[in-house]
Amino acid sequence: MSIPFVKDLQFSYGTVSGLSPLVRRVIASNPSAFTFHGTGTYILGHRDGVAVIDPGPDDAAHIEALLQNLDGETVTHILITHTHRDHSPGARLLKQRTGAPTYGFGPHPPAKTVDGVVVEEGGDHDFVPDHVVTDGEVIRGKGWTVTALHTPGHISNHLCFALHEEKALFSGDHVMGWSTTVISPPDGNMTDYYASLKKLLPRDDVRYYPTHGAPIDAMNTGHSPQHFVRELIKHREAREAQIVDCLTKNGPQTIPQMVTVMYAEVPKYLHPAAARSVLAHLIHMVGDGRVAVDGGGEADEAAVYRVA
């Protein structure tokens, strides 16, 4: 794999880290296999015009640490990249303490069910933004300006925020420096994800600030953020080539059969997440005609797949 991941991250929980003249970060203590060391809450601006990006989980201790590091400053904006529970629930606590309004693409997508069972977990269904933000909308604060970019794929309401003054992009979970992004249907959509990655390529951003992990820039990766995005696209294309190869060599296969082969080097406890990613790829590939569901029907977890 040629993606220049950044695994090294120097920080202390509850302590603010200065990352640039306009950007600081406090990391929540919610480490996991999917959040790396935890949610990185970004502070944009200073003194009486501060924006907080992704306040994180419903964790009073994290919000208290954040406010202690902002002692004497005024929070004027709360920006949300998307409504997973490690990103947006803290907005309610922060708004209660500061009165600052929230900004986001919209509430969490309606829960999807199959045979009456909810098939998505991890959504913050309580979040409703005070200000609904559209693609290309400009948000201005004291000393800073951001443009919202709608980047569906990981989730349909995902936004990135581009900081004009420093040519930086708060990339949420759309692009992460430590790992690839989970694309989990039904709301996670691989076709949208490809389009959202390609949307970043013509831009002149010099640094990405993902919500999990270290910044992505030439200093940390040896390459531009755009190079990182191109490698992410190549990685996804290689996965799809792997799917075609698996089906060509072995005939019709189920997703668990493919995951066993394709993710043989990955710990088995991560195979369920890998299966969701393979399903996202297969929905995309059935859609463009490269793969078919054996016997007809739609792409889902129970289907048997073959080369079209």
Image (spheres, rainbow, N blue to C red):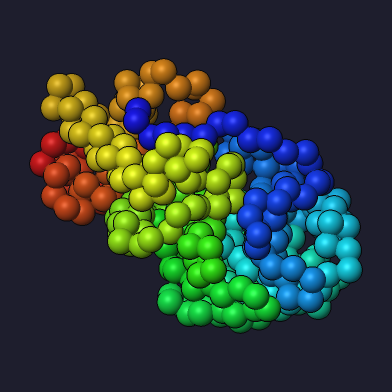
Say if residue 186 shows up in the picture. no
Which quadrant of the figure has residue 274? Answer: top left
Say if residue 93 shows up in the picture. yes
Q: Would residue 165 be found to the left or right of residue 181 on screen?
A: right
Name which residue lies at 43% across and 75% down: 135
Name above or below for residue 26 compared with residue 274.
below
Q: Position of residue 100 (x, y in %)?
A: 76, 77
Q: Would residue 30 be found to the left or right of residue 195 on screen?
A: right
Depth order, front residue of 47/308: 47
Q: How many marks?
A: 0
Q: Position of residue 1 (x, y in %)?
A: 35, 28
Name which residue lies at 81% across and 46% down: 14
Q: Would residue 83 be found to the left or right of residue 177 on screen?
A: right
Which quadrant of the figure has residue 149? Answer: bottom left
Which quadrant of the figure has residue 38? Answer: top right
Name above or below for residue 214 compared with residue 92.
above
Q: Can you name the residue that lies furthest to the top here?
A: 265
Name which residue lies at 84% across and 56% down: 69
Depth order, front residue of 149/96: 149
Q: Position of residue 64 (x, y in %)?
A: 87, 56
Depth order, front residue of 283/193: 193
* Quarter the C terminus occupies: top left
Q: Can you name the residue that lies furthest to the left here?
A: 308
